[in-house]
Image: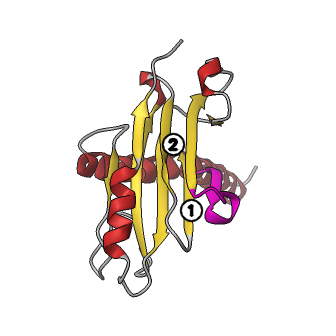
C-alpha cells in the first residue's frame, strides 16, 4: 500500500473518530454548562429559577426571545421523581423537558391545557408513581439529569406583574421514592 493511500486512510479514520466523539460529547458539555448556570441561579437542583425580562445581554437561555419570560428547573432524578406544577399564564405558554444530551423529550403548551394548570412528574424509565398521583402526567425521562423550561409570552410587559405572580405559584419538588 502506498504512503499516500495509508496517510489518507489514517486521516479518514481519525476524522471519523473525531466527528463521532464530537457528536457524543458536545451536547453533554453544552447541557452541563447550562445546568450549572441555571442550577447556580436557582440555588441548586430541583428548584425553580425565574428569569427576568430578557435584555440584549441576558444569556441564562441561549438567545432568549425578548417577548418571552423563562422559568427553569434543573432536575436530578437520583433524589426521586420530580413534580412540576402550577398555573398556566394567559397567552402563549409552554413547558419543554430536555435530557442530559440536549434531546427535547417532552413538550406541552397552553392549547393542550384548557384548565390553565399543569401537573407533571418526571420519573426514571420504568418507575411507577403511587396511586395518589392518578391523573398526574408521568413523564419517563431518558436521563437522570436535565432541564425543565417554561416559556411565557409577556408581549409589551403590561402583564408582567401578573406573570410574576404565576411564577411564584409554580413548584418544582422532589417526591419520595417508593
Q: Position of residue 11 (x, y in %)?
A: 61, 55
- Front-most of 6 and 52? 52
| Residue 77 within the segment the image draws in magenta | no
Q: Is residue 171 above or below residue 60?
A: above
Q: For this rendering, which residue is in front, 131 or 98? A: 131
Give the x, y percent position of residue 2.
72, 54
Mark 2 and mark 1: Cα distance apart in space: 20 Å
Q: Residues within 10 Å of mark 2 (few under 14, many from 20)?
A: many
| Quarter of the rendering containing residue 30 | bottom left
Q: Is residue 114 above or below residue 57?
A: above
Q: Is residue 53 left or right of residue 113?
A: left
Relative to the observer, which residue lies in front, 154 or 9?
154
Residue 32 on image: x %, y %:
39, 46
Write down the residue under mark 1.
94
Q: Which residues are magenta?
A: 103-116
Closest to the observer, 109 or 126:
109
Residue 109 lies in the magenta stretch = yes
Q: Is 79 above or below relative to 28? A: above
Quadrant of the snapshot with the C terminus? top right
Q: Residue at x 55, y 56 (%)?
A: 95
Asked which quadrant contains residue 139, the reply is top right
Amino acid at each position: 500500500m502506498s504512503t499516500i493511500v495509508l496517510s489518507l486512510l489514517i486521516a479518514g479514520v481519525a476524522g471519523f473518530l473525531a466527528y463521532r466523539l464530537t457528536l457524543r460529547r458536545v451536547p453533554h458539555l453544552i447541557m452541563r454548562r447550562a445546568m450549572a448556570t441555571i442550577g447556580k441561579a436557582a440555588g441548586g437542583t430541583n428548584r425553580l429559577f425565574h428569569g427576568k425580562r430578557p435584555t440584549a445581554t441576558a444569556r441564562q437561555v441561549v438567545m432568549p426571545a425578548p417577548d418571552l419570560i423563562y422559568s427553569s428547573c434543573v432536575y436530578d432524578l437520583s433524589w426521586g421523581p420530580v413534580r412540576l406544577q402550577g398555573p398556566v399564564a394567559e397567552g402563549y405558554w409552554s413547558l419543554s423537558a430536555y435530557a442530559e444530551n440536549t434531546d427535547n423529550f417532552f413538550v406541552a403548551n397552553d392549547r393542550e391545557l384548557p384548565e390553565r394548570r399543569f401537573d407533571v412528574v418526571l420519573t426514571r424509565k420504568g418507575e411507577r408513581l403511587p396511586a395518589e398521583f392518578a391523573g398526574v402526567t408521568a413523564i419517563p425521562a431518558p436521563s437522570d439529569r436535565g432541564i425543565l423550561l417554561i416559556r411565557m409570552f409577556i408581549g409589551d410587559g403590561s402583564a408582567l406583574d401578573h406573570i410574576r405572580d404565576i411564577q411564584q405559584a409554580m413548584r418544582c419538588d422532589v417526591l419520595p421514592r417508593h
